[in-house]
Amino acid sequence: MTQDIARPKVAVWKFASCDGCQLSLLSAEDELLAIADEVQIAYFLEATREVVEGPYDLSLVEGSITTPDDAERIRHVREISTTLITIGACATAGGIQALRNFGDMDEFRSLVYAQPQYVASLADSTAVAEHVSVDLELRGCPIETSQLVEVINAILAGRKPVTPTHSVCVECKLRGNICVTVAHGTPCLGPVTQAGCGARCPAYDRGCYGCFGPAESPNPRSLSDWLEEQFGVDHPELLRLYRTFNADAPAFRSESRRHEEVAP
Amino acid sequence: MDGAQLADPVVIAVDELGTLIGTLRGDGYRVIGPTVRDGSILHGELHELSDLPRGWTDEQAPGTYRLQRRDDEALFGYAVGPSSPKRELFPPRQRLWTATSDGDASFHVTQERHESARIAFLGVRGCELAAIAVQDRVFLQGAYQDEVYVAHRSDVLLIAVECGSPAGTCFCASMGTGPGVTEGADLVLTELLDGEHRFLARAVTEAGAELLAALERGEPTHHDITAREQVIATATAGMGRELDTDGLHDLLLGNLEHPRWDDIADRCLACTNCTLVCPTCFCTTVEDTTDLTGANAFRDRRWDSCFGLEFSHAGPASVRSSTKARYRQWMTHKLATWIDQFGTSGCVGCGRCITWCPVGIDITVEADAIRRASDPGAT
């Protein structure tokens, strides 16, 4: 193992999230030892209670910002990090918990908690990039381990990571998947969703759920119109299609809002 | 053997196709042809006669493909599916080279060796032969040869089956590439379903004649010859689409600011499906990666699309940032500037871009819309 002093210090932070994206790093079983050789895992509470003080060369941030404390803490993380990369739908779009952004937070709080006055929450669950500058966003719910390893590789080599922003359709075609929408009539968000998962769901004969959020030039309105016209998918169902893990990503948010307005 | 002898048709029984597949496999060929998989007719490796889609067909419309049963035992009673010989001849991903550190500041580059695979395509259509000819011009006949394509194209047998079941999105008759086959194949078969199920076969090359010589052959009757003509005539009349190519080059290039481009952009998903199923589209990107040790770097090439934002990234940004600009680039290249560049249209009329567009955008309808709006005299 090389000297600690020579290896970049890496920190992994958690905000409002399920920990699944951090686990993607631990799931990199084939590469984990090699990664540990090349970087110093300095702060990663999911993996070890041993903490090396900052500042850090690279911070991987999981989770969305949902409380006033979070909003403070993310600014501190930014200050002590040279490079800050957000990982996963929570950190890049507010996550599934951003469904509350479409409702009334005070009402939810009063219904869920016996003593709501002790719960300090922000009205919205928001992406990290809405609070601090972010060097790279890695999409997915959860992120794809191979993409995380690629990003770490790229940072170590000082090069641009290969994390394309085109649609999932490209991955389907590269892989030789049949198009589930055209051939089976299965609604699929692939044409408006960013690649990265390797088109996993269509490979198993299911439509894309949009885990990686909107692709680079999304046109969800056209896709919705087609799904409604061809397959009779109604407005409430179309609304739900866009309102999942990346509900608050701008292109999906505006499209689900549109179906809210026209829904009976 | 002279041309007249090569072109003399013979009749072969259905089971002889099984013999043909076996012979090819025995000669070390991977036999690629139609198979039923995932609710569609896709290219796959053929091991025996029963791998062919006997009794299956497809129904195609803009944005829609459905596998259907036929009421006969046809083996090739379908139109083209999403796969084409492009996948084998111009694979989606290829490593180009690996660079390895020599431990100091220097490194050495190892070019990837592209192994030549023997491939026999069975069931190739006229439109697909035309598409292969288009890619041959692009990759083999220009100033530079593409070494990946050269390797995969070098030992290929093309056994065509003339199309008797065009789809609702087909327009090869407009593009002059089908449904009959006159050139580009080694062996041309026509499936005859009237009376006894059989094939009319014509060798076009020496290799095709050798294949045919190994099969049991019969003399065709006058009826067999007219039955083949009937298959072609029926298929020609059954084209689901038409594309008026008269003056199309100048029409499109003279209408670069036509309002129809905005209308298309409202519907287009920029998802890339049309280009990736197109049997002639050849655009790629390169991806440079490293391993964790930093001792090895890799350059890979993969299929890309002019519908991607990054594809036209030059300097600080993409030069075709709007979907309108990207669709216009694709369609004008395919139908117009391709002719300037390579001497033929880039479109062979296979209809894949229409069927596999998830929102059913139809290149023939869009070209027609621009024509109508540009020419008040058009009906």
Image (cartoon, coloured by chain):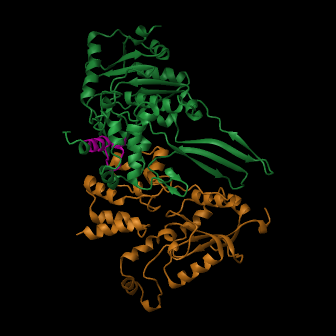
Chain colours: A orange, B green
Whether residue B11 is in magenta: the answer is: no
Most foreground residue, B283 or A173: B283
- Do we see residue B82 in this rendering? no
Position of B154 compared to B295: left or right?
A: left
Q: Looking at the image, which residue sits at the far front? A: B254
Vertical comparison of B111 with B72: above or below:
below
Position of B233 compared to A252: left or right?
A: left
Q: How many marks?
A: 0
Vertical comparison of A2 with B179: above or below:
below
- Do we see residue B212 in this rendering? yes
Image quarter for residue A193?
Answer: bottom left
In the picture, the quarter occupied by the C terminus of chain B is: top left
Most foreground residue, B81 or A92: A92
Q: Main secondary structure of the magenta part?
A: helix
Q: Which residues are the magenta region?
A: B353-371
Q: Residue at x 24, y 42 (%)?
A: B372
User: x and y percent of residue A163 in the render?
Assistant: 55, 56
User: x and y percent of residue A231 in the render?
Assistant: 27, 53
Q: Residue at x 61, y 80 (%)?
A: A76
User: x and y percent of residue A254 in the render?
Assistant: 36, 68
User: x and y percent of residue B122 in the render?
Assistant: 43, 26
Most foreground residue, B199 or A252: A252
Most foreground residue, B243 or B378: B378
Q: Residue at x 62, y 50 (%)?
A: B288
Position of B73 compared to B91: left or right?
A: left
